[in-house]
Amino acid sequence: MKITLENAAVDAVESACIVVGVLEDAPLAGPAAELDAASDGRLSRLIASKDIDPDRDQLTLIHGLPGVKAERILVVGGGQADKFDRFRYQNMCLAAGKYLRGHAVREAHICLHAMEVENLDAAWRLRVAVQGIDHGNYRYVATKPFKSDDNRPLKQASFQGGDELQAALDQGIGLAVGVRKARELGNLPPNICTPIYLAEDCTKIAETYENCSIEVLDTDEMAELGMEALLAVGQGSSNPARLVVLKYQGASADEAPYVFVGKGVTFDTGGISLKPRDSMDEMKFDMCGAAAVIGAFEACAKMQLKLNLVTVVAAVENMPDGKAYRPGDVIGSMAGKTIEILNTDAEGRLALCDALTYSERFKPAAIIDVATLTGACVVALGHHASAIMSRDDDLADELLAAGKTAVDRGWRLPLWEDYQSQLKSPFADMKNVGGVPAGAITAGCFLSKYTRDMRWAHMDIAGSAWKWNANEGATGRPVGLLTQFLIDRLA
């Protein structure tokens, strides 16, 4: 979708559809008021007669509004004015994008960002509007192409505003590109999106931007480094593991990079600890941590942020086989620590621990791993927030603040030493699971053993990356939070 700015008077904009927002119990404002004035009060009368419903996320399409050059006006309700906040605003933008995707129009002019939202400025409102419209406009077609009579997504969208909003528009486009990349990778079926496919897709990203590079480690190279934990996860699969290292240099070479590490389990059967058959198809989403850090990397490269970023993807498939690792095995890791395997379905932490150890070489300013790590996280937080764990209070606060700004919320869980006792083993340095109590936290504790000397945070996105049994696909989260975290480092 081509996205531009258009600064003409809203009633003079020649468009297939203009999108404006209205609130309950509040006078029309901004472009909605301008359209009302141009049409001699027609919008006001339609609201008074209840032909336009200003309730939350209600949409009304009006044809041929007098005095207005646009063919249609899409009016999006935001609900009660005293309850209108950034979350309701984001939902308005998403609802408008989904509506337009399913309509015959191929072009629209968006004015939602003219609405007042808390104390947030026009640049913030525009960024969220661009992301929301693009998110709603997305449709997965990789293995389900359009039919001849299908309505197609928007081909072009203009947003009300002039040159003063160009920087915000560019950021919104970059964020939208990153979220779309994460959603597309997450939605691909596991017979296509294998570890090698992820490596090839990352190679294309690196080739697209001049200041990017990539290194891909195969199983032999990982074995030489002692990545026994990562390789154990994939040894039952016919699809070989890969460690993908993407590098973006937007600042001087001596400036410490930020490092994002993503769990890229492209399909997770549970291995020998086989999962139940119900909903196992959703385990194609077990690589959404990798998808998120790849999406954030591309967003950073698209925006050309003036910092350095390294993205490390531990790409592997967990399958049962005669060669697969077993409950009861004791395996090593790149850090030299031994791990007793109690459950082969707790595989993500094994792939991540070696990737985290590998990432030490970059001497990062901060390192953040992102993973669909535990079902326990979904039990704790549902699908609304990503869990954040860190020993560093400042880093945790930075991530929480980024999530609030990006409307991509996180919630902090404790990482107290008390929980470490659940990982003690008589046969190895640690067990790979700590039992049912605090399962999301003990998974974070496991990873903390490999990050003692780093400024590190762990994000469990098992609930936010997609919704269980919802048939809606990948959300693209937390690309917004991760990218906003990077943007905030430039302030």
Image (tube, helix red, strand yellow):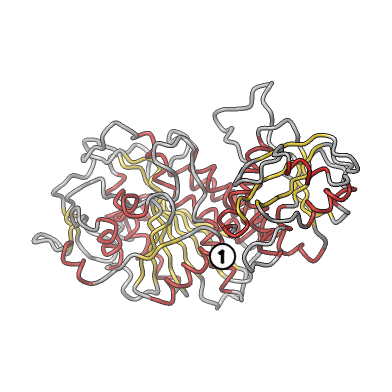
Which quadrant: the C terminus?
bottom right
Q: Position of residue 264 (x, y in %)?
A: 41, 49
Q: Residue furthest front?
A: 49
- Choose top left, top right, bottom left or bottom right for residue 156: top right
| Image position, residue 348 (x, y; %) | 32, 52
Circle 1: is it few (<14), some (14-19), or many (20+) Cα within 10 Å?
Answer: some
Which residue does the image show at 41% across and 49% down from the upper left?
383
Q: In the current view of this chain or complex, which residue is farthest to the top?
A: 148
Label 1, secondary structure: give it.
Answer: helix
At a point 59% along the width and 71% down the height, the residue shown is 307
Say whether residue 437 is left or right of residue 199.
Answer: left
- Say whether residue 306 is left or right of residue 337: right
Q: Give the left or right position of residue 169, taking residue 82 as reference.
A: right
Above or below for 187 versus 179:
above
Q: Quadrant of residue 65?
A: top right
> Residue 443, relative to residue 394: is it above or below?
above
Asked if 470 appears above or below 287 in the picture, the reply is above
For the N terminus, the quadrant is top right
Q: Which residue is mark 1?
A: 405
Query: Which residue is depicted at the point 21% across and 41% down?
Result: 273
At label 1, the amino acid type is: Thr
Q: Position of residue 146 (x, y in %)?
A: 63, 26
Q: Is residue 91 above or below residue 366?
A: above
Q: Nearer the viewer, residue 214 or 309?
A: 309
